[in-house]
Image: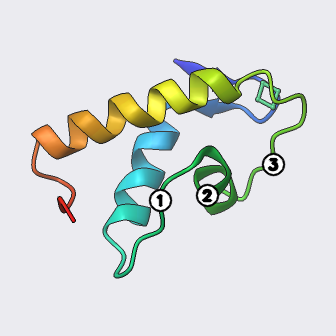
Amino acid sequence: MIVCSCQQVSDFDIELALLDILNQPEAPIPTPGVVYRYMQRRMQCCGCAPLAVDVIYAKLEDLDARGLICDA
Ligand code: FES
């Protein structure tokens, strides 16, 4: 599913970025800004921001349920 049409970001791109970000020591809170910066993308119109937040939360729950990210 495409989350951001301006930067061609999919939900899978976000999932991969979250895996990398959250498995770093002292991982930052994965805000859309943190996630997009990690992917070397920058929001343009910001129309995707609400959806990006929803996708990040959903992916966090899914990755946690699958034991792929640390609870801390
Ligand atoms: S849709 Fe994501 S910045 Fe425009």
Q: Position of residue 72 (x, y in %)?
A: 22, 65
Q: Which mark is residue 29?
A: 1
Q: Label 1 to label 3, Cα distance in Å?
A: 18 Å
Q: Residue at x 47, y 53 (%)?
A: 17
**Residue 48 vertical position relative to residue 12 in the rendered view, above or below:** above
Q: Amino acid at mark 2?
A: Val
Q: Amino acid at mark 1?
A: Ile
Q: Label 1 to label 2, Cα distance in Å?
A: 8 Å
Q: Amino acid at mark 3?
A: Arg
Left or right: residue 13 compared with residue 61: right
Q: Which mark is residue 42?
A: 3
Mark earlier in primary sequence (1, 2): 1
Report if the CB atoms under discs 1 and 3 are less than 8 Å apart.
no
Mark earlier in primary sequence (1, 3): 1
Q: Position of residue 68 (x, y in %)?
A: 17, 53
Mark 3 lies on a secondary structure that is loop
Mark 2 lies on a secondary structure that is helix
